[in-house]
Amino acid sequence: MTINPELIAGSPSFAALWAAERFAAYACVPLIVKGEVKGVLEVFHRSPRNDDDEWRGFLETLAGQAAIAIDNAQLFKHLQHSNLELSLAYDSTIEGWSRALDLRDRETEGHTLRVTEVTEQLARAVGIGDSAMIHIRRGALLHDIGKMGVPDAILLKPGPLTDVEWETMRRHPQFAHDMLYPIAYLRHALDIPYCHHEKWDGSGYPRGLKGEQIPLAARLFAVVDVWDALRSDRPYRPGWYDDQVREYLRAESGSHFDPHVVDLFIRTSRE
């Protein structure tokens, strides 16, 4: 089709393009999908054309496919943005829960964020990738969520616990499992809340897992958790010096802790 000269004269920029490129024909089809214009498909020719119905049909079909492709790309982009916002909302909620736990037990205030950061560093040193790191961070933040099920009279008791009270305290990993497992997006983060009190020699709780039966994330976290607890001041004792803590970790290597994790932690903590 030959373009109407009046259209060229009405647009100086279009006229300049038309003259510079020596165009002789032009076709234009709107890109419409779901009743919304997504753009325009333009075809320029440097020689006159007498387009038939078949060519016009092909051009309209091409425009329709292009409109659908653009719409799908926009939908995908919007979906990605929505998923990111949802993920950020999830993580903000988890961090809020962890702060609430710290506020409940003033003795351990700040503990959760410290052990989360150090566990992430140790996990990277092991070679854990970004996708798994999300679950490790969430699990570390929620490692003591099960203590929500422990009565204040036991959790905040200033003196030593009785055997019956210890039995209740040792149930907090199971409480964590029961609280988090029904939440689909947190199910992969359960390794730390559920298993961080298991021991390498099988004497831990709640299930008495042994060696590599214990998930790697829980083995990493267990070392970091004890390290931070021993370094922190408590009403019944002052925090230990770093050398004292390292000696304790070495002494418990192979019984409480995975020996390889202890070696890696001590090596990386000095770098």
Image (cartoon, grey):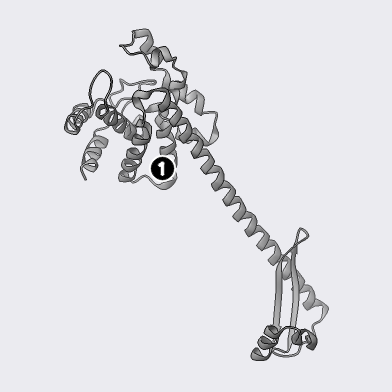
Q: As rendered, which of 26 and 200 lies closer to the eye?
A: 26
Quarter holding the N terminus is bottom right
Q: Is 210 left or right of 98, judged from the image as shown?
A: left
Q: Is residue 254 above or below residue 131?
A: above
Can I make out residue 197 in this image?
Answer: no
Write the residue at 64% across / 90% down: 20
How far across and down, in percent of the image, does residue 61 sit?
75, 69
Q: Is 254 left or right of 192, judged from the image as shown?
A: left
Q: As rendered, which of 19 and 223 lies closer to the eye?
A: 19
The residue beneath circle 1 is 133
Q: Is residue 253 above or below residue 203?
A: below
Q: Could you tell me which secondary element the residue under label 1 belongs to? A: helix
Q: Is residue 154 above or below residue 178?
A: above
Q: Is residue 154 above or below residue 60?
A: above
Q: Residues within 10 Å of mark 1 (few under 14, many from 20)?
A: some
Write the residue at 74% across / 83% down: 26
Q: Is 24 left or right of 119, judged from the image as shown?
A: right
Write the residue at 37% across / 37% down: 116
- Splitting the image into 4 quarters, where does residue 193 fall? top left
Write the residue at 37% across / 44% down: 128
How far across and down, in percent of the image, does residue 7 sit?
77, 84
Q: Is 35 left or right of 173, judged from the image as shown?
A: right
Q: As rendered, which of 96 and 52 lies closer to the eye?
A: 96
